[in-house]
Amino acid sequence: MQQLPEPLKVLVGQLSKLPGLGPKSAQRLAMTLLKWPEKQTRDLGQNIHDLRDKLHLCDRCGALSDTDPCAICINEHRATDTLCLVPEWDAMLALEDGGFYKGQYFIIGGLIAPLENVTPEQLELDKLKQRLLEGTITEIIFALGTTIEAENTVSYIKELVKREFPHINVSRLAQGIPLGSDVKFVDKATLRQSLNYRQKL
Ligand SMILES: [Zn+2]
């Protein structure tokens, strides 16, 4: 990167910190931006600049939004008694994309992972308790995934809810064989979970 003019070098350095981009692809990206019409490049820069000013974290659910509370939290057509717990915003987006869940969300801000120094104190659990103290939630649905960290986080929060909010039902997304897949191609761990969470017909 030595021969690059300084401003370009700075940009390539910044771009290469983005996920999936190494120095070479970052340089290619920067060159593409330079070939764009000037207005288009300036608009992109302006939009990146404005992101911080225009986006807020929703105080209710923790989602990124241009309003606070966000559109989901103030939507009157959504159920107010179910709260879906997701680790991060992208999980919430994925569920929303499906369009089948019509309750509330709460982003806990990660998963308990002692090896990565993520402790329960770093999650938004105080805020979750405040939310539950409002008294409208009667069911919590865990949508945290199926990793060991997710399992640990589920059992930690489940205990907390059982202890402090015993009237609230706790459930989780079903785990099992993906739709359209053949049993013989499903891994052992998934098969075991499918058997554990089998459904009555
Ligand atoms: Zn919200």
Image (cartoon, grey):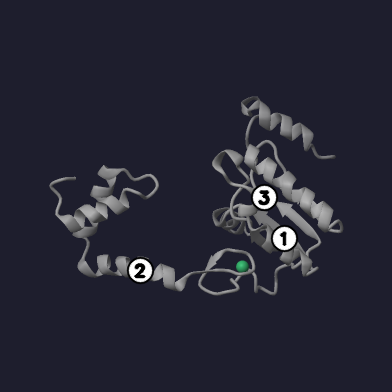
Between 189 and 156, the one nearer to me in the picture: 156
As measured in the structure, the alpha-carbon distance from the residue carrying label 3 to the one carrying label 1 is: 10 Å
Marks 3 and 1, the one that precedes in the sequence: 1
* Disc 2 element: helix
Residue type beneath disc 1: Leu
Q: Amino acid at mark 2?
A: His
The answer to which of marks 3 and 2 sits earlier in the sequence is 2
Image point (72%, 60%), residue name: 83
Quadrant of the picture in which ligand 1 is shown: bottom right
**Residue that mark 3 sits on:** 143
Q: Name the element at disc 3.
A: loop
Determine which of the numbered discs, if any, sits on residue 83 in the image.
1
Would you say the residues marked 3 and 2 are in contact, meaning their CB atoms lie under 8 Å apart?
A: no
Lower sequence index among marks 2 and 1: 2
Residue 61: where, in percent of width, then height? 63, 64
Please state if 49 lies on the left or on the right of 177 as rendered.
Answer: left
Query: What is the three-letter code of the residue carrying label 3?
Result: Ala
